[in-house]
Amino acid sequence: MAERNVVFAGEVTLPAIGQGTWYMGENDRQHSKEVDALRAGIDAGLTLIDTAEMYADGGAEEVVGDALQGGLRDKVYLVSKVYPWNAGGKKAIAACEASLRRLKTDYLDLYLLHWRGNFSLAETVEVMETLIAQGKIRRWGVSNLDYADMQELWRVQGGKACVTDQVLYHLGSRGIEYDLLPWCQQQQMPVMAYCPLAQAGRLRDGLLNNSVVTDIARAHNATAAQILLAWVISHERVMAIPKAGTVAHAQENAAALNITLSAEELARLDNAFPAPGRKTPLDVV
Ligand code: NDP
């Protein structure tokens, strides 16, 4: 049983499954349940937590901040994201400081541009470097940038310091395998796969009930969700960041780190859900 790892910026090795937080912090009555789920995930080894100023309008960051109280902050690789319209100049500094306040910490391990907007990539890179110099973030990266955007970023001064591209990727949506993923792998840059469970099948009808997926799950004494995660992290330098709102789901997702799919199982999944053989626009939610 091989636990999969992913290396960020050539310096931090993390388990290939982390924790998402979209839709956390929406409802006060769920607060302690969400805190418990995140803590159970950390306890089970899911030490990267992904959040954003966007989620519940800062509410998800507050849930994460509470989950990290009691000495957990330094055990976690904490990732947040800036809205595109805040991703330059003084707005970015203020947005980052507000995220830090909600997260009750004084630094982010990684700060991502959530998606491209009106600020030029050069302006965003510049302010990310300022935030690093101020000690507010350790590293920066991007999200929802397709292959052509990454080529543009690589031409910007300082652009190659980007640590990751966080994009939608699951068994039912494999467009990044055409160009973006191989290119990131060549750069030795990890990709963070969001919606790795296709939002529990909502984004791709039938994914969790597909007979190939459930057959393979049975063979591993695992759940279909675990097979979807094991499939995502079977790809070199890919980390999955499922969101779990319960302790049981967090623990189940962590256990997927120990599932290794055989070449034959991967071929069956490939056959049932083939990657597109041509360029397709980057899938987003
Ligand atoms: P996911 O694919 O992670 O699916 C989340 C859903 O799956 C929830 O309904 C959750 O239910 C359910 N679930 C979790 N674990 C299990 C399990 N073991 N068995 C069955 N169901 C399970 O979708 P997300 O959209 O949340 O994506 C993951 C994360 O990626 C986000 O939370 C966010 O951090 C990030 N993201 C980033 C985006 C970007 O633009 N950069 C866009 C979208 C997401 P329950 O809550 O009941 O556990």
Image (tube, grey):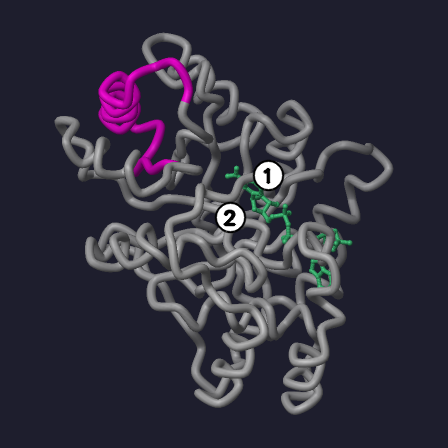
Q: For this rendering, which residue is in front, 162 or 185?
A: 185
Left or right of residue 161, residue 83 in this image: right
Where's residue 57, x and y in %?
65, 23
Q: Secondary structure at mark 1?
A: loop
Is 261 drawn above or below residue 100 in the view shown? below
Left or right of residue 91, residue 33 in this image: right
Where's residue 225, x and y in %?
67, 68
Pointers 1 and 2 in contact (CB under 8 A)? yes
**Dot placed on the residue nearer the N-terminal end, 1 or 2:** 2
Q: Is residue 100 visible?
A: yes
Q: Quadrant of residue 23?
A: top right
Question: Residues in magenta?
Answer: 117-142
Q: Dot 2, crowdedness within 10 Å: few (<14), some or many (≥20)?
A: many
Q: Name which residue lies at 39% across and 34% down.
A: 111
Q: Name which residue lies at 63% across and 88% down.
A: 220
> Does 133 lie within the magenta span?
yes
For disc 2, the marked residue is 168
Q: For this rendering, which residue is in front, 224 or 106?
A: 224
Is 11 drawn above or below residue 159 in the view shown? below
For disc 1, the marked residue is 285
